[in-house]
Amino acid sequence: MSRLDERPDDQPDERPEGPSGEPEIRVAGLHKSFGDNRVLRGIDLEIRRGEVVCVIGPSGSGKSTLLRCVNLLEEPTEGRVYVGGTELTDPDVDIDAARRRIGMVFQQFNLFPHLTVTENLTLPQRRVLKRGKAEAARIAAANLERVGLAEKAGAYPSSLSGGQQQRVAIARALAMGPEVMLFDEPTSALDPELVGDVLAVMRMLADEGMTMMVVTHEMTFAREVADRVVFMDGGVIVEDGAPGQVIGAPRHERTRHFLSRLLDPAMADVEEGTSGRAGPQ
Ligand SMILES: Nc1ncnc2c1ncn2[C@@H]1O[C@H](COP(=O)(O)OP(=O)(O)OP(=O)(O)O)[C@@H](O)[C@H]1O
Ligand SMILES: [Mg+2]
């Protein structure tokens, strides 16, 4: 075998089909300011169909803002965003139609407390997609089954654990038939023992070939499930590569600093004591 046949990194491709070459999400020259606060300072990112990209980085680095710009929950100050070949930043685009391709899951589950689990899943399908009652119910049931919560169909959110509520929120997003899924720290609000079930559902979606952009601090998940890890700091992408490289052998000091802080918050400042870098905001 020639050297050209070797993979450029040590990342084994465990996903059966692997991502295809087509970009499903493309962000080009993205800037976002809030007043004088320049939060995103030129982001270029492509995520291919079926690819799972984990975004990591310190608090305030702009991870959520980037995710929110991808489905135009925030309007970029400058730059372009494409999803599935459609430019969302085109002023003439049908943004509601474009957004339907994108599922989003937040740290907070945002379920309606006065609606049952099934009703939480059928309401947006009926309102946004104009599906009939029976069809919406059928799709709700299928997606509750997918996240392992078929038996909770008639329950109210308050009777569910945080992990179960987050899985309902994922099922609600899936019921809309998205082409891509965006996750913003989906397990950060959960008790540690509930994190695993949510990550298992996300792992299943990845295995099914869903295109996913995941802001997370779950390094084991990033290592095992992501095709790429993107490290952001100060509104720019500092490092973008295979998980084994970015997490296992980071090239940049800022990435190393972040990872050491994540692994041992008390030690990070000692190790990096001479760097003069400000602490987290
Ligand atoms: N709607 C907004 N209005 C004004 N400033 C905002 C808004 N949203 C975010 N910001 C600012 O943008 C910066 C980046 O915030 P963002 O939430 O994107 O960071 P993050 O990387 O997701 O952080 P965390 O890890 O804490 O979630 C912060 O300084 C924040 O105060
Ligand atoms: Mg955030």
Image (cartoon, rainbow, N blue to C red):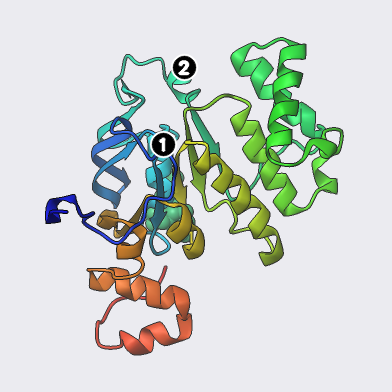
Quarter of the image for residue 23 reads top left
Q: How many marks?
A: 2
Q: Where is residue 230 in the image (x, y as percent from the top left)?
A: 33, 54
Say which residue appears at 21% left-offset and 56% top-offset: 8
Q: Which of 71 and 263 is in front in this view?
A: 263
Neighbourhood count class around disc 2 (C-alpha, 10 Å): few under 14, some 14–19, many 20 upward = few
Quarter of the image for residue 59 reads bottom left
> Mark 2 near mark 1, Cβ–Cβ under 8 Å?
no
Disc 1 under 8 Å from ligand 2? The reply is no
User: Regarding mark 1 in the picture, which secondary structure is present there?
Assistant: loop
Q: Give left or right: position of 57 versus 206.
A: left
Residue type at mark 2 is: Ala
CA gap, disc 2 to disc 1?
A: 21 Å
Q: Where is residue 95 in the image (x, y as percent from the top left)?
A: 42, 20
Look at the image and tell me in which quarter the C terminus lies: bottom left
Say which residue appears at 30% left-offset and 84% top-offset: 272
Among numbered discs 2 and 1, the one appearing first in the sequence: 1
Say which residue appears at 23% left-offset and 54% top-offset: 7
Residue type at mark 1 is: Gly
Look at the image and tell me in which quarter the N terminus lies: bottom left
Q: Name the residue under label 1.
A: 50
2 or 1: mark nearer the eye = 1
Residue 133 position (above or below residue 197): above
Q: Mark 2 points at which residue?
A: 97
Q: Position of residue 51 (x, y in %)?
A: 39, 41
Residue 23 position (above or below residue 93): below
Rendered image: mark on residue 182: none
